[in-house]
Amino acid sequence: MFGEPKKEMGFAGLLTTGEGHGFPLDVLITGDDSAAKTKVAELVCSGAMRPLDVGPLRRARELEALGFLHISVQQPLELNWQSAIKILP
């Protein structure tokens, strides 16, 4: 009924390794408390990921939209939850 089971890492695998396709994962951080953002950034760094401060809490709306867009393209692009949004220099 459900087909053969497959062993796949998916999103959890990306978080476990802290990278995707050889690049560290970007973690977008928004908030109004700079001390709290610093602590979150330290936590992100300890997981071998790259923290990016994207501004004040009012930016959270844009982050939610970006997340929804990323979720929306998973099935049509057959990404199988093994993708990430990456900010390149």
Image (tube, helix red, strand yellow):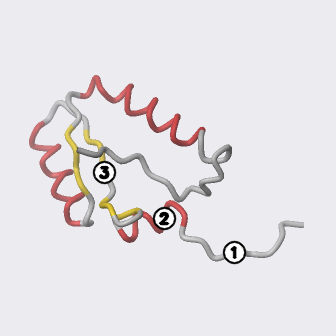
Q: Is residue 61 left or right of residue 32?
A: right
Report x, y in % for residue 41: 18, 52
Quarter placement of the C terminus:
top left
Q: Nearer the viewer, mark 3 or mark 2?
A: 3
- Judge left or right: residue 41 versus residue 76: left
Mark 3 and mark 1 residues within 8 Å of each other at the beta carbon: no
Question: What whole-number distance in Å separates the C-alpha atoms at marks 2 and 1?
Answer: 15 Å
Mark drawn on residue 6: 1
Question: Splitting the image into 4 quarters, where does residue 60 fall?
Answer: top left
Which residue appears at 30% of the width and 60% of the height?
24
Residue type at mark 3: give it.
Asp
Q: Secondary structure at mark 3?
A: strand
Please rate how many residues cluster around mark 1, counting C-alpha atoms within 10 Å: few if below 14, some from 14 to 19, many from 20.
Answer: few
**Disc sitting over residue 26 in the figure:** 3
Residue 27 appears at what percent x and percent y? 30, 49
Q: Secondary structure at mark 1?
A: loop
- Residue at 60% across / 38% down in the picture? 72
Mark 3 to mark 1 CA distance (whole Å): 27 Å
* SS at circle 2: helix
Tell me the kind of residue under disc 2.
Answer: Ala
- Inspect the image, locate mark 1, and give the three-letter code of the amino acid beneath it: Lys
Q: Give the Cα distance between marks 3 and 2.
A: 15 Å
